[in-house]
Amino acid sequence: MALSTKPETISQYCMISSVTFKKTKTGKDYAELTLSDKTATIPACKVWDVTEEIKETLKNNDVLYIDGEADNYGGAYKVTIKEVSLPSGEVPLSELVPSEPIDVEGIYASIKSEVESFKNELLKKVTLGLLDEYGEALKSISAAKHVHHYKRGGLLRHVQEMLNLALYMQKMYPVANRELLISGIIFHDIMKAKEYTYNHGIAGDFTADGVLLGHIFLGAELPKRYVSQEEAESEEIKMLQHIILSHHGIKEWGSPVEPAIIEAVIIHHVDNLDAKTYGFADELSSMEMGEVRKSRNIFATVYKHELGNYGG
């Protein structure tokens, strides 16, 4: 059994990525869990009539045996958990943690080598400073809780795919600074490492900093950490900060400023394109041919046509 197949019944070990305790309108306790195995992550799984014993079990264990039922009512896969129990023995995390199918060490080494070859010494200094501090996080964490690149290693995959798209655009528009694009992409989402709690690389709940400040503000502060006070006033650092602040594109989407330089425009659009395309591809992987799905995960209607390359 695998969560990616969206089974009607679930009887398997799962990783508990997050737990939230709530009350019904009538005052009864229940819990919402995010469940994962190596194939998928399922949010908002309900446990009704939660006792103190169940609360303690959910609070203190990140791997549990789950018995539950599911349906696709309203176009969203919903799981109701009937019973949770402790593992009878050690469960390999490789069987439970959904991970991107990428060569993590190879991709990271390639990105770092690219930065080490920069001609702009200040962009090299600041970006290598980031990789020295957050390289392990970049290699392991997901890029989001849901919607896109939500598996272990998702942020690294997202960065790699954005680099591929952005550098293709830079060849078409060489007025854009190649090294600034690379640095901006590496920096743009890295403070999601501080925005979320993580369980084996999978994003869970917001941290206090995530709620109060958010990854955009935290990220914009970061470049100055790796340079001198004089260097912090340079054009390179200012442009890098602008890219971080504007990468969501418009203020309604969370950016305090909108892109005002060509590199920021490119980064915003390849960020959005990669996230949206990943979301569609992820939905298609669990759909039947000819199916129409109103997906609450990606806020879109998806149709699986017969002309796609679905890998059999």
Image: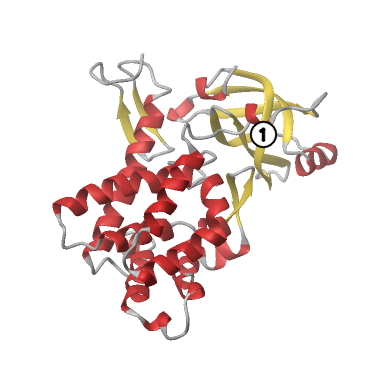
Q: Which residue shows up at 41% across the image and 45% down it?
A: 158
Mark 1 residue crowding within 10 angstroms, few (<14) / some (14–19) / many (20+): many
Q: Which residue shows up at 74% across the image and 27% down it?
A: 91
Using the rendered image of the protein, determine whether residue 182 is visible from the camera's viewpoint.
Answer: yes
Specify the amino acid type for callout 1: Met
Which residue was labeled with disc 1? 15
Left or right of 220 on screen, residue 10: right
Left or right of 290 on screen, residue 219: right
> In the figure, 19 relative to 191: above or below?
above
> In the figure, 222 relative to 82: above or below?
below
Q: In which quarter of the image is residue 265?
A: bottom left
Q: Quadrant of residue 174?
A: bottom left
Image quadrant holding the N terminus, namely top right
Task: Give percent across and percent down for residue 103.
Answer: 47, 36
* Most foreground residue, 14 or 124: 124
Task: Give percent across and percent down for residue 290.
Answer: 30, 16
* Extreme residue in the bottom direction: 230
* Most foreground residue, 289 or 110: 110
Task: Give percent across and percent down for residue 280.
Answer: 35, 33
* Most foreground residue, 50 or 222: 222
